[in-house]
Amino acid sequence: MRVSSALALVLALAMTGLVGWALARFWASGLRLTERLAWSLATGLLSQAVLLLLSAAAGIPPRRAFFLAADLTLIAVCAWLGRRRRLGRERTDASGRTEPLVLLLLATAGAAWFLFCLLAMAEPMWATDYLAIWGLKGKTIYEMQALSSRLFRDSALYWAHREYPLLVPLTLASLAGMAGEWNDQALALLFPALSLATLALTYGFLSRRVSRIAGAAATLLTALCFRLYSPVNAGTAEVPFALGAVLAACAFLDLLENNSAEVRGRLALAALFCASTKQEGTLWIALLGAAFLCTRGIRGWKRVEWKAIAALAAPPALHWMLLFLLRGRQSRRDFDFHFFEPGHAGELLSRFAAVCVRVATIEMREAALPLTAILLYLLVTRRGLADVLLPALAAQILFYCLAFSVSSFDPMYAVDGAFRRIAMTLFPVLATVLGARIPVGALPDGASSVPAGG
């Protein structure tokens, strides 16, 4: 890989983060600096994808000059609007002192991340899903300088999952446009950047809501998830969705304590990020909505509670509506929904049972030691603020099993080929739950657990 290509991609990511920082100031004030950096990257990636779509609609080539002009305009507008509104500052550690154990945990996590970064950049992205789905769509958008209808209409591309969300291809195409070339090896830098944002968010959130020890421990657990942060996932949607799932989880936990406009804004952005990254992202947001309804109950609902539900439901609904208008109705070749018909209930139950047995005897058996350690840890520690996420995590896994049960192909083939890969995207959220249970003192700096938002 040429140094110039890598440098151009780094500058593109930096500009993306800067745009996100300018936009995120309206809903991310009061957060830790590391949290705000993660929110800025997510916001910037969504912004660049929207800009690419706007340029395609206007017939303007989505290249470096366009992105530079549009990004600088966005930053200038946000700076002007910011002068008209009093914004909070990100939280910092008042003590200025970090425990040696925290430094050791973070240093180890940093080393694990650096290893992933080296492996991801060692060669051009080569995963099958990248070549057949995400990279194919991204390069098609980049080369044609538009969101071509061929991606949704060409029968030769039926195997490329035309029904999938488009944030990852749009992100790859926009970064390539900003960098001035499509370079698979340089574009791989996106995925270490996303994993670093996930680590930063995990540490920042838990250090704000629990303690720095909790944040550092959860960060290390996440960084050591080598089945997720591996070269085979560079170029696919797994690493981006892992970030989206943690964004949504953190915003949701803040919402339970402080149903403010800022927190709802973060939740809406996370919901859009999840839904536009993977199909199961919409499911994750729906399960968080169900968890919110369960925690609040039916009694005592106020207008702000409905605003919270709207923040969860409206972005995915808008995303899927726009995607339908863009591409029309698309069949899902992976699933056979006739199993949900009343006459096939017995067959569906049989297939579901077989899938669950396969997962329990093959997938979970291979991970028996870490799963046992996690279970024992949950049994011997007290409840944490993130425990409300555990039912949602379990339900997400059960829905995966149900999806495998209605596979158009052999359900066992679907389990063996996809279960471990997609289940690992939820591990950073589980690490957040585990970190929140670490019994270390009270809230840091004696401050409020949730920043007051407007």
Image: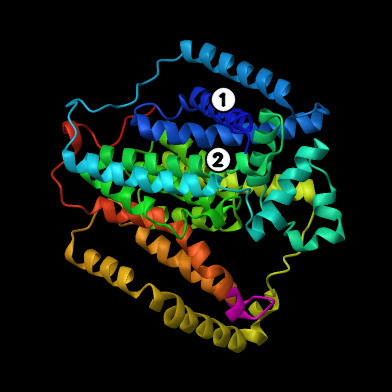
Alpha-carbon span between mark 1 and mark 2: 14 Å
Which picture quadrant has residue 443?
top left
Say which quadrant the N terminus sits in: top right
Q: Is residue 174 left or right of residue 122?
A: right
Position of residue 386 measured from the top left corner of the image (x, y, whole percent):
31, 52
Magenta part of the chain: 405-414
Any magenta on residue 411? Answer: yes
Look at 83% across and 28% down and name the residue there: 59
Q: Examine the rendered structure and indicate whether residue 203 appears above or below residue 364.
A: above
Image mark for residue 189: 2
In this view, the residue in front, 439 or 96, is 96
Lower sequence index among marks 1 and 2: 1
* Amino acid type for the residue under numbered disc 1: Met
In this view, the residue in front, 282 or 115, is 115
Residue that numbered label 1 is attached to = 15
Position of residue 297 measured from the top left corner of the image (x, y, whole percent):
37, 55
The crowd level at tag 1 (other Cα within 10 Å; few <14, some 14-19, many 20+) is many
Q: How is the image coloured?
A: rainbow
Residue 367 appears in the figure: yes
* Amino acid type for the residue under numbered disc 2: Leu
Pair 1/2: label in front = 2
Q: Examine the rendered structure and indicate whether residue 115 appears above or below residue 77.
A: below
Which picture quadrant has residue 344?
bottom right
In this view, the residue in front, 356 or 13, is 13
Q: Is residue 298 left or right of residue 102?
A: right
Q: Examine the rendered structure and indicate whether residue 134 appears above or below residue 79.
A: below
Position of residue 57 measured from the top left corner of the image (x, y, whole percent):
80, 32
Position of residue 194 measured from the top left corner of the image (x, y, whole percent):
50, 42
Seen from this angle, which residue lies furthest left?
441
